[in-house]
Every structure is written in C-alpha cells, then in structure tokens.
Image (spheres, coloured by chain):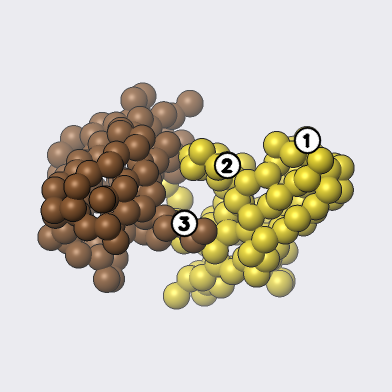
Amino acid sequence: GAVVSQHPSRVICKSGTSVKIECRSLDFQATTMFWYRQFPKQSLMLMATSNEGSKATYEQGVEKDKFLINHASLTLSTLTVTSAHPEDSSFYICSAAGWADYGYTFGSGTRLTVV
Amino acid sequence: AQKVTQAQTEISVVEKEDVTLDCVYETRDTTYYLFWYKQPPSGELVFLIRRNSFDEQNEISGRYSWNFQKSTSSFNFTITASQVVDSAVYFCALSLIYNQGGKLIFGQGTELSVKP
C-alpha cells in the first residue's frame, strides 16, 4: 500500500529558530500534499494544500511567511516553521494524494516543541 | 460550506460493551466522500473506512460496522464487544473530491476509553 514517511517524529527547538519537516511518498507520486496542525485534545486543522510545482494554498488565518511549504517534486514536500515560538508547539501531520486510488495517505506526524 | 460534527467529545465504556460513535455532516453537494479514522496515543492516523455518497449500504468489518443514512446526514460507527485496544480518538471526515485536490474536513473527534 501507499506509504508516506514523515521526519522527524519529534523535534525540540529554541524559540526563534526554524524547523523543517519532511514528508516523502515512498511508493507513489504525491501530486497533492495537505499539511495539518493538531493541538492537544483538538481536531486536525488544515493549514495548506500544495500541488507539485505550484505555490501552496493556505487556509485563512495561516501565515504563509511563517509556515513555508515546498512541494518541488512528486515525492517530497516540506514544511518549514520559521522563527518558531512556543505557541507553534503542536503536532504537524501531512497527507498525500496521488493519481492511484490510494486515497489520503497520512504521515506519522511530527511533534514540535518550541522552548 | 461543509461541516462535520461529532457531538460526543468523550465516551467511556467497559470492555465487551458495544459503543456507537456519532457523526453528522453538512454539505450541499450531491457527490461527497465520508471517512473514519482512528488516532491512537502515538498520533498516527489509521484509515478505517471510506464511503461515497451514492453508496448507502451499511458495512461490517469484524467488530466494526458503519451506518450511513443520507436522510439524516449521518455516518455512525459502531464497535461491537469493545476491547481495550480500541481506546483512541476517532475522527469522522468529509471530502468533496476524492483523492486529487480535495481537502478532508474533520470533525472534532471522539475520545473513546475502553476500560478493562
């Protein structure tokens, strides 16, 4: 079946630094990647949608200059949290969709803690 | 606009009890897709089922069953003879375009706790 590898699974960073999260589709081409954020005891909130080779479409209220999304290839998408602050501490999870009938394949998530 | 409502925030049952998780959705589109996902404490999302709006047949998979009723815009999930390993957060979700480009809209989730 389809697999999306997400790294790192956990990261702790200092306030003001940037963190990059990677999602790779291992056995299919991910033409669309969705990035979600989940705070404790809350649902998954879509941050942005990116199509390979195009600029990401951000949901209302999500700062595009803070959450940089790159989807330059059909197998790799990255989310960079720039100048991270404690309020950015959250669980970030990606979901890939491709041409095959795999539906939405989720990565295993990244737990970001900003100290 | 589309919306998914899971009114039950938390449910606690004793092992072997049956439990039903409710899901009500809103959309004006006639073509849509409904999903259930399980999120254990580790955080990953486990796909359970997908249904399209034209298939109202109920489905059973082992101890899991789903009841899709368009008349009430509901897609409820029942676990029969619950087990401790069923403890997790369960999400119902809706998409208008399956696969390509269609974002998933999640309900608030229901945290199920199954006690021995």
* Residue extending furthest toward the front: A115
Q: Residue at x 49, y 42 (%)?
A: B43
Q: Answer left or right for B52 relative to A26.
A: right
Whole-percent x and y of residue B50?
59, 47
* For residue A23, above or below residue A61: above
Amino acid beneath label 1? Gly
Whole-percent x and y of residue B102?
39, 55
Which numbered tag is attached to residue A71?
A: none
Q: Which residue is drawn at 15% across and 47% down?
A: A18
Q: Mark 1 lies on which chain?
A: B
* Classed neighbour count for the residue bearing mark 3: other residues with Cα under 10 Å, few (<14), some (14–19), many (≥20): few
Q: In which quarter of the image is the N terminus of chain B?
A: bottom left
Q: Which chain carries label 2?
A: B
Q: What element carries label 2?
A: loop
Instruction: Tell me the CA gap for discs 3 and 1.
Output: 31 Å
The yellow-tinted chain is B
In front of the other: label 1 or label 2? 2
Name the residue beneath numbered marker 2. Answer: B40
CB atoms of marks 3 and 1 within 8 Å? no
The brown-tinted chain is A
Name the residue beneath numbered marker 1. Answer: B62
Name the residue beneath numbered marker 3. Answer: A40
